Amino acid sequence: MGFFLTIITLVLALAITWRYLGSYMAGVFDGRVHFLAWAERPVYRLLGTGPEHEQTWKRYAGAMIIFSAVSMAVTYLILRIQGSLPLNPQHMAAVKPALSLNTSASFLTNTNWQNYGGESTMSYFSQIGALTMQQWVSPAVGIAVAIAMVRGFQRRNSPTIGNFWVDITRCIVYILLPMAFIAGIIFVGQGAVQTLGGPVSISDTLNGVTQTIARGPIGFMEAIKQLGTNGGGFLDQNSATTFENPTALTNWLSIYLLLSIPFALTYTFGKMVGSIRHGAALLGAMVIIFGVWVGFTSYGEHTNNPAVVAAGQCVDVPAGTTCTPTPSLTHTSTGNTEGKETRFGDTSTALFGVASTNTSTGSADASYDSFTPIGGMGLLTGMMLGEVTPGGTGSGLYTILIYAILAVFIGGLMIGRTPEYLGKKIQAKEVKLAGLGSLVMPMIVLIITGIAVSIHAGIVGPENSPPHGFTEILYALTSQGNNNGSAFGGLTGNSAFYNTVGAIDMLIGRFAIMIPALALGGVLAAKNVVPAGLGTFRTDNGMFVGLTIGVILIIGGLTFFPAVSLGPIVEQLSHGKFF
Amino acid sequence: MLDHLRRSAIFVVIAVIFTFAFAYAGTGVSQLFFKHQADGSITANGSTLIGQNWAAAKCPGHSVGSCVFHGRPDDTGPYAASKTQSGGDNPLEANGVSGESAATNYGPRSKLLLNATIQLIAYWKGLGVDDPTPDLVTTSGSGYDPDITPQDASVQIPMVSNATGVPASSLAALIKKETHRAELGFLGSDYVNVLQLNEALVKLQ
């Protein structure tokens, strides 16, 4: 019942957000909303640009790539010299080169893969100036690219697709800043920590315990971490810790925040191209897949943990150990409790996990490594679908638009009609770009996984034995290739090998999709619109929703099925065996 | 190209300044309106949000740790009784890493998890808890879950009643009184904060 109400309230809140935030974002990027122009203008003056300076897709992409390179370099530099910078009450030393490389690539690409424990590695200066800084700009860059691609459908015979600097500035000022500030206040009000005062020591007279408790400016970082589908938290255990995610209410708020912009962008798309139905069709494909994934993942987590049940029944007891059966462990319906927090419960934790992996967030309110095989498979395969259900801030929209173009092409071929999407002819060049954008990710993920399981440096990573150990490797490289950032935490990722291949994985996973997306925007913007006729294949009805879902499942499902069957599927089928 | 470089450098500087301004503004607002929460919900005996090691509580005339309610076996690293060793109420080493929030990360079909669970069951039975619940034999995600469910507390009643002399019915009433309902009645689970429960228990005695 509680879980049912959790879902209902989320659906209601997200439906309202879809309609109004979606419409508001369209207004922001079309330039109709300008009540904060006083904050925008000084930025444009410093940059020497402005809304009147439109860019071709090549200039737009050039600005995006060079900005990304510069911001990654700055992040890297701050991590390397944090020992000499202020705001370092715990006297953290410089972060090592390979780890700095991985971490700066990770936050740049909106992945937020963390090969370090935040409270034991990063100074306050690094957490704010290097990591949180990227948590603001990387979602803005993602949304800007999505909007630029949408302009390809919105405009006719246009050589330009907008201005990169204006788009990222507007995104931060009008969308991210107000929402994150309000959410930050709620997080802190519920109990998230927000102080620059350093760790605190306590002593308990009841049990003689003394503790030194790590603290920091956590609550407001939490807000942008979730809203920008970043996922990288201040503390090692992320949203499982009480200081980041103190109550079930903040857990709900986290799920809401990380789904709000990715879903709402489909409305923005519909509004900008003048057909809400087209946005709703994409939303439909996202919601149907998302719903199925929530269903089987939370079912998986609502079953008991096999190892705990076996211990309760005294199965497989090592020789020489005494064991008496424990009825509570075999009969309860508390679900899988290993690695989960009491205040959230099993199903809400699974919902959080699905929301976090089907967007490109990757925050974790539990140890995903300890999920049941079915539950863990839900998280892993959610990422493998290419982060489109609903995907990350911006990245979800531009990736599903690439899938939609493929769906149009395939649908057109099947029934012999002209492939058109929103009146724009889909021709060889568009299909090539869409093919590139959809195939690079699976290729890079599978190739690097193949390398990792073949060489010593890769094989020593996992903590668990196969098949779960294989899943840990596959999960890590899938997560980084899709810019998700969640982990099966048993993998020791902080090695020269995993830091380096991870960085490559993340950078290719981001830019090999972004650049074709921008190119598509540019190519489509230059085209005129063909009036819809009887021969036009409809792209705003249930049939098209089904076709898009089919393309997403076939690309994600068929490409990764062999790899998944060696991991979670084998594990699920190994009844009564322990490894 | 040079234009892009110049604008990138300027924008990154603006972004860093903006991020610091946001963090400081957030800290200011938080310290002004929610000082207790923003500082970590610290009370006389520790933070209500950070689980503690109750296994070492001294109980004159009874076995160590039997006169208080325990949290989940999950408290390692800097939050533990001793900073240098894994000193939680888990008699086992959770994952050997000190200094961080941490989970075991054992897979669902892990022999290590099976063995750890068997040893935790034996540990509870040694303390007089005959039927430990799943929460009590598994570790949490953060490594310092401060809460347990009302049922987790109830199964510890015989142990605590025996060591403190407080009748079982009074303990049951105490747990009921200390139970926090799920947020807004439907979000998450009902839970008991172990620190608050033990403070109430001491008052009762």
Image: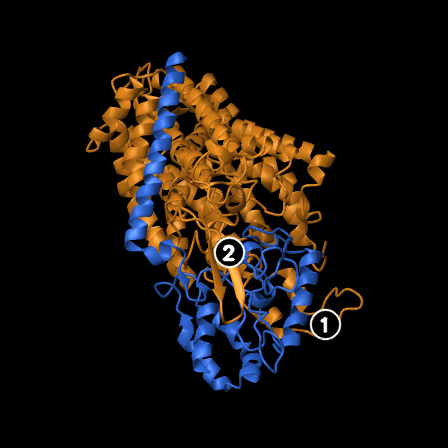
Chain colours: A orange, B blue
Q: Is residue A401 above or below residue B98?
A: above
Front-most of A286 and A447? Answer: A447
Residue type, mark 2 in image: Thr
- Sort mark 2 into few (<14), some (14-19) or many (20+) by Cα contacts within 10 Å: some
Say whether mark 2 and mark 1 are on the same chain. Answer: yes
In the image, what residue occupies the spot 61% across and 83% down? B61
In the image, what residue occupies the spot 34% across and 63% down? B184
Find residue A191 and report its image quarter.
bottom left
Q: Are marks 1 and 2 in contact (CB under 8 Å)?
A: no
Residue A370 percent across, percent down from the top left: 59, 54
How many labels, in total? 2
Q: Chain of mark 2?
A: A
Q: Residue at label 2? A: A212
Front-most of A557 and A348? Answer: A348
Would residue A528 be found to the left or right of residue B113 on screen? left
Residue A15 visible at all: no
Disc sitting over residue A477 in the figure: none
Residue type, mark 1 in image: Cys
Residue A74 percent across, percent down from the top left: 46, 27
SS label for mark 2:
strand
Would residue B25 be found to the left or right of residue A546 on screen? left
Which tag, 1 or 2, sits closer to the chain's start? 2
Foreground: disc 1 or disc 2:
2
Q: Is residue A364 above or below residue A555?
A: below
Q: Residue at label 1? A: A323
- Sort mark 1 into few (<14), some (14-19) or many (20+) by Cα contacts within 10 Å: some
In the image, what residue occupies the spot 41% across and 35% down? A129
Find residue A127 and report its image quarter.
top left
Q: Is residue A247 above or below residue A543?
A: below
Residue A207 percent across, percent down from the top left: 53, 70
Q: Chain of mark 1?
A: A
In the image, what residue occupies the spot 55% across and 50% down? B100
